[in-house]
Image (cartoon, rainbow, N blue to C red):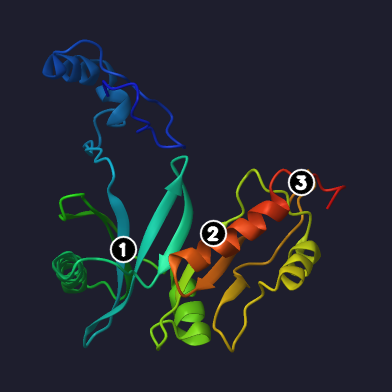
Amino acid sequence: MTDPLLATGHAGARHLHRLAGTDLPAGITAYWADRWTWASAQGRFPVVLEEFIPDARTVYCEQHLTDTRIQPTEKGELRYTGRRLSHESVPLRDLAPAVEKQLFDGSACLAAAYRDVGYRGRISTDAIVTPDGRVLFTEVNAQVTGSWHIYEVFAHHIVDASAAPERTVTESHVPAHWTVPDGATFHRTLAELGLGYDRATRTGVLVSMPIVAQPAGGAQFTFSIVSATPAGRDAIWNALETRFADVCPAAA
């Protein structure tokens, strides 16, 4: 990469190389001459090149493949903070109809290819939506993914998110700057703030996984915010942020 202002490096990347000078072809050729053996595992595998596209949305469409049909299950959006996955929302909303059709048709085409070679089960077709409205597929996960419980259990069965009035389920990781001492504290805080999931309003917080206190202090887990609007989601997040950000375990 040449622009030092672009934070394109993945948070888990082992290496990040910045091309020097203005002659990009020469710089790329020199890089591969130096790094091809490492990148290709001694020449045994090809190398996949990806283009970084600023301001793109990360989305997915999951499918269920059986002997008799291909059934779309849900579409969602992934959001990143500091190049790490921080939020996942279902159902996917606010896509232009033409863009949504690109996502659905491309996902169905990929699902058909997997089904033709004998795969049966669930797949997630992952993509990005560029600022000019193109859908570019990045990978296919032929497995039950971590998204399944968010839409199948929470959004479909508990919340019934597509029923009027519509709701959105957004799963989040406890951010690094929060300190949640244990599960009891988190649930007590939800009760005090009136933020626990309310079946009548179909809004509030659902804990997505067991809360296990860490020996070093501060439990790490995921939770889902059920909201009617982005502003409603932000209000719940901000209330939890105010309570848990930069709080030491002893004070909590």
**Can you name the residue that lies furthest to the top here?**
21
Position of residue 169 measured from the top left corner of the image (x, y, whole percent) = 48, 71
Residue positioned 74% across, 63% down in the render:
186
Of the two numbered discs 2 and 3 on the same chain, state the one appearing first in sequence.
2
**Can you name the residue that lies furthest to the right here?**
250
Query: If the image is split into quadrants, where does the N terminus sit?
Result: top left
Crowd rating for badge 2 (residues with CA inside 10 Å; few <14, some 14–19, many 20+): many
Note whether 41 is above or below 103 in the view shown.
above
Query: Mark number for residue 60?
Result: 1
Three-letter residue code for mark 3: Val
Real-space CA distance between mark 2 and mark 3, rounded to the nearest whole angstrom: 19 Å
Label 3 or label 1, whichever lies nearer to me, is 3
Label 2 or label 1, whichever lies nearer to me, is 2
Whether residue 250 can be seen here? yes
Quadrant of residue 190 in the image? bottom right
Q: Looking at this view, is 51 or 188 the one in front?
A: 188
Residue positioned 15% across, 51% down in the render:
132
Quadrant of residue 108 in the image? bottom left
Residue positioned 30% across, 29% down in the render:
39
Quick one: SS at disc 3? Answer: loop
Query: Mark number for residue 247?
Result: 3
Real-space CA distance between mark 3 and mark 1, rounded to the nearest whole angstrom: 35 Å
Quick one: SS at disc 2? Answer: strand
